[in-house]
Amino acid sequence: MHVTDVDAVLALDQGTTSSRAMVVDRAGNILALAQKEVTQYYPQPGWVEHDAQEIWASQYACAQEALRTSGIAPARVAAIGITNQRETTLLWDRQTGRPLSHAIVWQDRRTAAQCDELRAAGLNDVVAKRTGLLLDPYFSATKIAWLLDSIDGARTRADRGELAFGTIDAWLIWNLTGGTAHVTDLTNASRTMLYDIERRQWCEELLTAFRIPRSVLPVVLPCTAEFGLTRSELFGAPIRICGVAGDQHAALFGQGAVEAGLAKSTYGTGCFVMLNTGSRIVPQAGGLIRTIGFALGDGTVRYALEGSIFNAGAAIQWLRDGLQIIGQAGEVEPLAGSVPDSEGVYFVPAFTGLGAPYWDPHARGTIVGITRGTGRAHIARAALEAVAYQAADVVNAMEDAYGAPVCELRVDGGGSQNALLMQLQADLLGLPVVRPGEIETTALGAAYLAGLQSGFWRDVGALESLRQEDVRFEPAMPAAQRRARMERWHDAVDRSRNWTR
């Protein structure tokens, strides 16, 4: 198929709380968007699961709906790009394609004790050196081991080569191709705690340490590659799968942060800050992780520093579903804006522990500073401030590790639509916060990657012209006030630490 014979790229965006699909034309315009929620399962405290069959069904339905709404015939789709919630872990039967259990979601903390034991045995240094990560339940390796040990007969079947492991990208590709492709990309592989990011290969030392047979692992490709062809019966015509990246890596690419020193922050269920460090793997520091930012088929590999914050939008969801002080998420901004400040209330939303820069799976949510005069508006404002405080912690740590200041923070995700939150973020960072004209940068990043591989877009330079700035939030808080607020936030964090020990 010649690039002039196609009209659009289809992006599949499988996230923690929903599956989405987007059709993007050559000018970067979104022609259609479809979305379906994904059920969250909490079988025990600290456990979070998804039904992988529901994920596939919802993602396929979204793809069909987006294509139908756009009016673009499948035969005129240049390629599919996939972006996904990372680290979420699944085992399935290679013969039947059926999952052995629910997927264990990235937020899940069931392997915290196992991580403690492995850390005490000295494995953390090996993990950091090879993978750039920290030994934490967040990543896939201990989840895989848990599934192999907990499902009857799973380890024996894995040793016989009957089972496949995948993060959600690999699961979607398997289903799209009818089981002919068991593949992942470099970014998702780099989040498993099993992948050597410098040598860019699976690490035998860590496979042995975690007791994971190599036979379950997918083939690893760059973010732009030929991942397979969809089954003809799915869309009426086969479509090439040409781009894959974990959600935060896709957002980095979609934000145009392709050069060293550029940073982005995505505000969703969690908050994920990523700084492009170019071809250099920065020495680990400040509770950050080092990861592969993105990798192109021409051999270009860009590394990144990342700070993963587990609970951002999840804190707002809790206000809605747990406390029931708002009816829908959009109500939090006017409610929080109805008071000038939180009156000394600090909310640490460590529902499933703390991520960067603390990495404490035993921390739990804490609200401090409550007085008789505290009302729902103060709690709402403290929740928004908590998101901004956490991101500020990460950016400050990044500047220290990278050895240079961040000049601006590019933002995206649903939370970036909250103007009060974005102004708080600029104030607490002392940096401009830049929101693009199109905040769907995660799905756009997947579309851009697929479009590059398929020839729909000529090169990375052609993509830069598609990016437009919407709003620039300038910091207005005095430096002394910013420092005092951050110090008080750190006091609150200290009170949440090590709670479940």
Image (cartoon, rainbow, N blue to C red):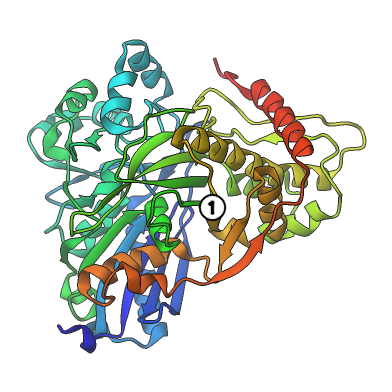
Q: Residue at x 36, y 19 (%)?
A: 114
Report how many numbered discs are placed on residues in the image: 1
Q: Is residue 488 above or below residue 405?
A: above
Query: Percent position (x, y) of residue 421?
Result: 68, 53
Residue placed furthest toward the front: 404
Q: Which residue is mark 1?
A: 268
Q: Residue at x 45, y 30 (%)?
A: 109
Q: Is residue 60 visible?
A: no
The image quarter containing residue 169 is bottom left
Quadrant in which the N terminus is drawn: bottom left
The image quarter containing residue 232 is bottom left
Query: Percent position (x, y) of residue 139?
Result: 36, 35
Quadrant in which the C terminus is drawn: top right
Is residue 290 left or right of 485 when viewed as pictured?
Answer: left
Q: Residue at x 68, y 21 (%)?
A: 495
Q: Is residue 253 above or below residue 369?
A: below
Query: Percent position (x, y) of residue 335?
Result: 80, 55
Q: Give the residue type that dot 1 points to.
A: Gly
Is residue 108 left or right of 448 when viewed as pictured?
Answer: right
- Closer-to-camera residue (23/465): 465
Q: Is residue 140 visible?
A: yes
Residue placed furthest toward the left: 160
Q: Is residue 238 above or below residue 83?
A: below
Is residue 480 left or right of 202 when viewed as pictured?
Answer: right
Q: Secondary structure at mark 1?
A: loop
Residue placed furthest toward the right: 373
